[in-house]
Amino acid sequence: MIDAIDQSAGLTPEDELYRARRFRPEFVDGAEQCRQSVLAPQQDQGLAADLRVALAHRMAALNGDAHLLADYAAQLAQLSPSAALLALANGETDLAEPLATIARHADLVTNTPFAAEASHIHLLEQAGLNNPQIVALSELIAFVNFQTRVVSGLRLMRSV
C-alpha cells in the first residue's frame, strides 16, 4: 500500500526505495498512523481538522515543498475552511487570536527550531490554549516537519 510519504516522494511499488522502506514496516505504518492522528484525530482537543490542515499547508509552504503544499491544499479545500483559516494556510500574519500566536509558533518551530524556548509555550497559554492543545499542536508541527524532511531525503536518494 502506498502511504502519504511514498506518494509525496513519488515512490511506487516498483521503486527500490519503496521496497527498502518496507524492510522496516513498523516505520512505514507508524508514520502513516502518526499522520492520521495529528491531522484528524478521534479526539481533536479543540483543534479541528481544518485548523490542523491549514497549519500543515502553511508549514509545507515554509519548507518549500510544492508537492506537500498541493496535497495539503487539496485536503483543506475538502474541509471548506473559513476565510481566517485560508489566511492562516496562505502564510498571512495579520490574524486574530489565537490564530496569530499559533501561526507565529508554527513558523518559529518550522524555520528556527533551535530558537524555541519555554516562553513561547507561555505565549500559547496566554492566547488561550490549554495543555492538551499545546501538546497536539506540538505533535502536528513535529510531524509535518518530519514528513517534509523524510520526503525530501527520499527524493534526493531517488535522484541519485
Image: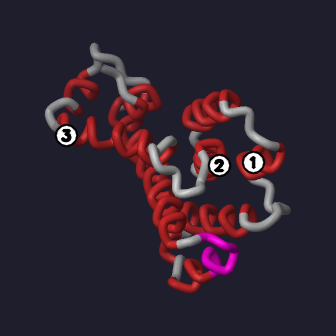
Does dot 1 land on a helix, a strand or a loop?
Answer: helix
Q: Give the residue at mark 2.
A: 51
Q: Amino acid at mark 2?
A: Leu
Tell me, yes or no, if residue 64 can be seen here.
no
Give, as a single range, the part of the protein colored magenta: 123-129
Q: State which tag comes first along the sequence, 3 or 1.
A: 3
| Residue drawn 66% across the image and 27% down it | 78
- Which comes sooner in the sequence, label 1 or label 2? 2
Q: Amino acid at mark 1?
A: Leu
Q: Look at the picture and state if 72 lies above or below 13.
A: below
From what the image shows, is residue 106 above or below residue 44?
A: below
Q: Measured from the top left, where is residue 70 in percent x and y?
A: 63, 31
Mark 2 and mark 1 in contact (Cβ < 8 Å)?
yes
Mark 2 and 3 residues: CB-CB less than 8 Å, in contact?
no
- Which kind of residue does numbered mark 3 sit on? Glu
Q: Quadrant of the C terminus?
A: top left
Q: Residues within 10 Å of mark 1 (few under 14, many from 20)?
A: many
Observer able to see residue 38: yes
Q: CA distance from mark 3 to mark 1?
A: 34 Å
Rounded to the nearest angstrom, the CA distance separating label 1 from label 2 is 6 Å
Label 2 packing within 10 angstroms: few (<14), some (14-19), many (20+): many
| Residue 18, image quadrant | top left
The structure residue drawn at horizontal position 33% and vertical position 42%, both measured from the top left corner, is: 31
Residue 52 in the figure: left or right of residue 32? right
